[in-house]
Image (cartoon, rainbow, N blue to C red):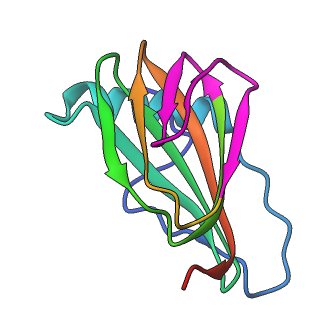
Amino acid sequence: MNTSFERPYRPVDLNTPLTKAFPYMAMAENLMEEATSATSGRASLTLARGDELTIVLVALKSGSALEEHPAPAAATVMTLSGSIIFTTSADKITMEPGDGVTFTGDILHSVYASEDSAFLVVIGGKASK
């Protein structure tokens, strides 16, 4: 088994000076193992958190989804592996590895995995009003 992280996992505190490297793909493989055994077909890990920024790694099994929801602030989703469909009331965007989308916190959105997928969510800036 890949040991890129262990549970319980404590997110990196971005309110203190530091530099931290992450093996995203190895971590995504670990999360996919968790997602496989989860009834929801998903698993996530908050990698880093601070007053102005949060970074979350998400794994979704094929056919699984994150139902429609708002973000707490402006955010970016970046696909690492697989294929996801990012949907808002105005857009339906198919995202392959290396693709990203940025949106404001007031945008309701959902994510569907067309195949086993991993992606990063970077939430930052000031919270939506």
- Left or right? Give the position of 59 relative to 68: right
Q: Nearer the viewer, residue 114 or 93?
A: 93
Rendered image quadrant of residue 64 = top left
Question: Is 54 contained in the magenta span?
Answer: no
Classify 5 as above or below 96: below
Q: Quadrant of the C terminus?
A: bottom right
Question: In this view, which residue lies farthest toward the front?
Answer: 90
Classify 85 as above or below 62: below
Residue at 34%, 16% in the rendered image = 62
Residue at 64%, 30% in the rendered image = 79
Rendered image quadrant of residue 67 = top left
Q: Nearer the viewer, residue 71 or 22?
A: 71
- Left or right? Give the position of 63 relative to 1: left
Classify 66 as above or below 54: above
User: Percent from the top left, x then y, of residue 128?
Assistant: 57, 79
Residue at 58%, 36% in the rendered image = 119
User: Percent from the top left, x then y, of residue 26?
Assistant: 60, 31
Question: In this view, which residue lies farthest toward the top?
Answer: 115
Q: Which residues are magenta?
A: 80-103
